[in-house]
Amino acid sequence: MSEPQMLSTNEPQRPGLVTTLAALTMASGILNLLLSLAITALIVIGTIGIGLLLCAPVTLLPAVLGVFEIIYAARLFSEVQLPPRPNQVLAYFEIATLLFANLISMAVGIIALVIYNDADVKAYFNRSA
């Protein structure tokens, strides 16, 4: 039996930390989206609809952040020639979710900033420049 031939390419493989970053960002995005919708629903139900005007601006940051995190994580998971640029602003907004008592997203933001400073990850993202 013949072994399948592996095509050798000169492209560097995606570091494991980039996959970890994508998984953490995806999980944080889903968590932010679900938590913001749940908090909004609870306040609207608890105040018989009046809380929608008060709650919508408060839960807007986690909901929008969740959507952007999911989109960015999907781009990181994709197999493309040129990876997306590192998104440190997203990490800063993840840290800002501490204002909404979301400790998990805050931890993901800090981990993301640490991962962005790794030498292999920098080299992987710099090949798109």
Image (cartoon, rainbow, N blue to C red):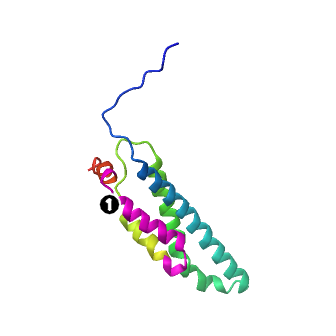
User: Does residue 86 belong to the magenta stretch?
Assistant: no
x, y percent for residue 63:
54, 70
- How many C-alpha atoms fall within 10 Å of the one at disc 1: few (<14), some, or many (≥20)? few
Residue 125 located left or right of residue 105:
left
- Residue at left offset 34%, top offset 55%: 85
* Main secondary-structure element of the magenta-colored stretch: helix
- Residue at left offset 41%, top offset 62%: 112
x, y percent for residue 6:
42, 25
User: Does residue 115 belong to the magenta stretch?
Assistant: yes
x, y percent for residue 20:
47, 53
x, y percent for residue 24:
50, 59
Q: Quadrant of residue 119?
A: bottom left
Q: Residue under circle 1?
A: 117
Foreground of the two, 5 or 77 = 5
The amino acid on which the numbered mark 1 sits, given as a three-letter code, is: Asn
Q: Could you say whether the residue bearing mark 1 is in a helix, strand or loop?
A: loop
Foreground of the two, 19 or 1 = 1
How many numbered circles does the render carry?
1
The correct choice, above or below, for 19 with respect to 117 in the image is above
Q: In the image as oriented, which residue stretches furthest toward the left?
A: 129
Start-end of magenta stretch: 98-120
The correct choice, above or below, for 128 with respect to 42 in the image is above
- Residue at left offset 53%, top offset 75%: 60
